[in-house]
Image: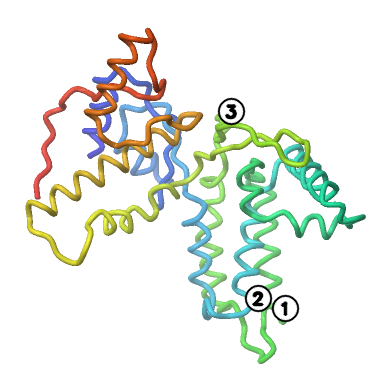
Amino acid sequence: MAAGLMKRYREAGEAAPKVMYVDRDCCSQHGQSPVKIMFREWDELEVRLDIWHFMRRFAAGVTTEAHPLYGIFMARLSTCIFQWDPEDVAALRQAKEGELAAKKTGHISQTALSARINRRELALHCRRRTRGVEETTCLIGKLLDHFDSEHGKDTLGVPLLDHERIQQIWKEQQKHIQCIQDPENFPLYMKTGTLKKGGVELCCYRCARGSTSLESFHLHLNRFIPGTSASDAHFQAYLLEGLMRWNDDRMESTIKGASSIRSYGSAMREAVDRLSRAVLGKPWDNRYHPPGAYTGKKFIN
């Protein structure tokens, strides 16, 4: 697979990826990491550990995920790793104040204002960055000490963390804190547009950090097949159609703006593009690209 990916990049004349997020094999105490060796043609490739997988390793140290303090612990663990861009947050708070002022809700405290801003708005309008190795190590250590004490027990005295297990996990994971840091001089956020709220023009961002866009891909594969049964020919047709739509959606999500043609039919889109260029002298949809050349790869059921 790795050899095939490097070959496709090489033959297409595309620049090699600069950063790759993985769920394991991010580093090695003896030379290069296995992933770096696997993609040896990409000399400038930086391998990073997906932070979601890093946090899930700590979740293995809890006594039960049903513990009332589990959600608080995981949220604070995320805070130990990330910090929001202060300028983006200030702009969002100003926009939220403008919205509330338009509704004439009267004076509202800063604490209440923060409560009105939800996680979805933060993720859409504010960028995050990692805190650095030293600060992250210090904060996670303090967090574990806090929840590994009396403060980490519920009203019945049940502890959130298994002491021996969480300490062993922390000992093993400290070496990976370097692996979860954002790469230097590499923009992980892409501006996808703007949105006006409360009289303030807010930027909309999409983050390229991690592997979350593919985390639930197996669920999408299941949804490609309608019903509970299908013949082998229909199964293959459904799967190919679903994969084509998935790739088309992923390609369009990386480009600014919304498509004016709501169709997955390549023949129809090709005809519209050809007629538009002939009649109007310009493409109807600037995001449309003709189908690529056949690569010789075949789908085997």
Q: How far is the residue under mark 1 from the one under mark 3?
A: 40 Å
Q: Which residue is mark 2?
A: 148
* Picture mark count: 3
Point out the tag, 1 or 3, that comes first from the N-terminus: 1
Q: Amino acid at mark 2?
A: Asp
Point out the tag, 2 or 3, that comes first from the N-terminus: 2
Residue farthest to the right, as pictured: 107
The residue under the point 63% across, 45% down is 130
Q: How far is the residue under mark 2 from the one under mark 3?
A: 37 Å
Q: Looking at the figure, which quarter contains the N terminus?
A: top left
The residue under the point 20% across, 49% down is 239
The residue under the point 66% across, 48% down is 122
Q: Position of residue 28 (x, y in %)?
A: 41, 47
Residue 80, located in which quarter of the rendered image? bottom right
Q: Which residue is mark 3?
A: 185
Q: Position of residue 249 (x, y in %)?
A: 37, 39
Q: Which residue is mark 1?
A: 151
